[in-house]
Amino acid sequence: MIRKMLPLIIILLLVLPAGAKAASEWSQAVTVYGAGLEDNRELLDATGGILGATEEDKVEYVRSGDVEKYLGVTYDDSVLKSSIRILQKDAGAGLDITVDESMGQITEITEETYKNALLTSGITDAEVVIGAAEDVTGESALAGIYKAYETQGEEIDPERAQNAQDELETISDITAENSGMEGFSQEQLNKMITEIKIQVIEAGGDLSEGEIRNIVGEELEANGLNGILSQEQIERIVVIIMNIQDSGLFESEEAQRLLDSSRNLIDEITSSEGFQDAKDTAQELGRDIQESGAWESFKDAASDFFRKVADFFRSLF
């Protein structure tokens, strides 16, 4: 009987996710302020209060050189005011992001968009607070998160950081281009892109351009965005997904954690007020937004997996 079970054990070891090596929890949080606050003590202190910074935190500043290094764009130090506080957690903790707008608005980037970008960069387990004491666009916050990892001696892969920035810019640009467009919301867009990532990972993480285009088309329909996004916008999304795949993220040791965190993000989006408003609007326009097509895909994949295991057992007797 043991000999008969041995092939099954080997198969399960091959198909079940291996324990991924990940950064362990930091002993202290890192607070990274935008360089524009360095000479403004009042604004600096107010921002620290928003972030929940403590005297035990490591403190750094994100400067124009950091933004150019990680995001590939150039800003003057004086405009960098969005700031972050981050604590890396043990693998499996998940990604918890809070955007605090009690004093200043982050005008161009939503919490879900930040989360999508960080998952793309490979950050899947951390507690993050993002905020500013006055209205800001929010770009320097992403560079600040990467600077925090550098401060802790854990360099972020530059290719993945650039892919994350491209994704963030694309989501922001498409949102701006469709501002006021009935039937469009950033919640739908974030959900669609997240579900595309999930499907690509579940399909093995090494798909052809045609296969990726098919998934993008399915998710456009599933999220009520078919006929709303332009062909140019769709092409940008295809390029993003292909670039992320080319970076190896969808097949890496982080893929399972990315999958788990992406599913959690879908749950957050679909339970948000913005998504429910978008769903109501879509219904009024005769469209439909699935609550979570990616989850249905996962259930189908799981069902298929256990069916194959059952078939294997039957073949032993």
Image: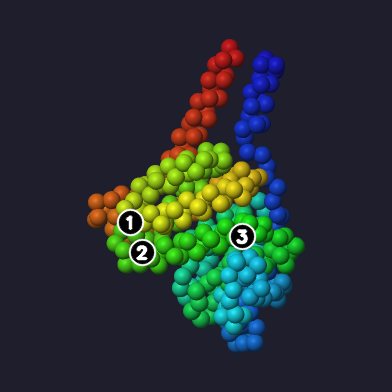
Amino acid at dot 3:
Ala
Amino acid at dot 2:
Asn
Amino acid at dot 1:
Ile
Question: For mark 2, what is the residue?
Answer: 178
x, y percent for residue 276: 35, 57
The image shows residue 48, relative to residue 23, as above or below, that is: below
Q: Which mark is residue 161?
A: 3
| Separation of residues labelled 3 and 2 (CA atoms) | 26 Å
| Separation of residues labelled 1 and 2 (CA atoms) | 8 Å
x, y percent for residue 251: 61, 43
Q: Residues within 10 Å of mark 1 (few under 14, many from 20)?
A: some
Of residues 286 and 266, which is closer to you in this image? 286
The image shows residue 7, relative to residue 66, as above or below, that is: above
Mark 2 residue element: loop
Q: Is residue 173 left or right of residue 308?
A: left
Of residues 211 and 42, which is closer to you in this image? 211
Whether pointer 1 and pointer 2 mark residues with C-beta atoms closer than 8 Å, the reply is yes
**Displayed quadrant of residue 18:** top right
The image shows residue 19, relative to residue 282, as above or below, that is: above
Q: Which mark is residue 228?
A: 1
Of residues 14 and 51, which is closer to you in this image? 14
x, y percent for residue 151: 72, 67
Q: Residues within 10 Å of mark 3 (few under 14, many from 20)?
A: many
Quick check: can you spot residue 294? Answer: no
Return the disc, 1 or 2, that comes first in the chain's sequence.
2
Q: Please tell me which residue is depicted at 29% across the width and 55% down the height of the picture.
A: 282
Whether pointer 3 and pointer 2 mark residues with C-beta atoms closer than 8 Å, the reply is no
Q: Is residue 3 left or right of residue 258?
A: right
Q: Residues within 10 Å of mark 2 (few under 14, many from 20)?
A: some
Q: Please tell me which residue is depicted at 50% across the width and 77% down the height of the picture.
A: 136
Q: Is residue 293 left or right of residue 162?
A: left
Mark 1 residue element: loop
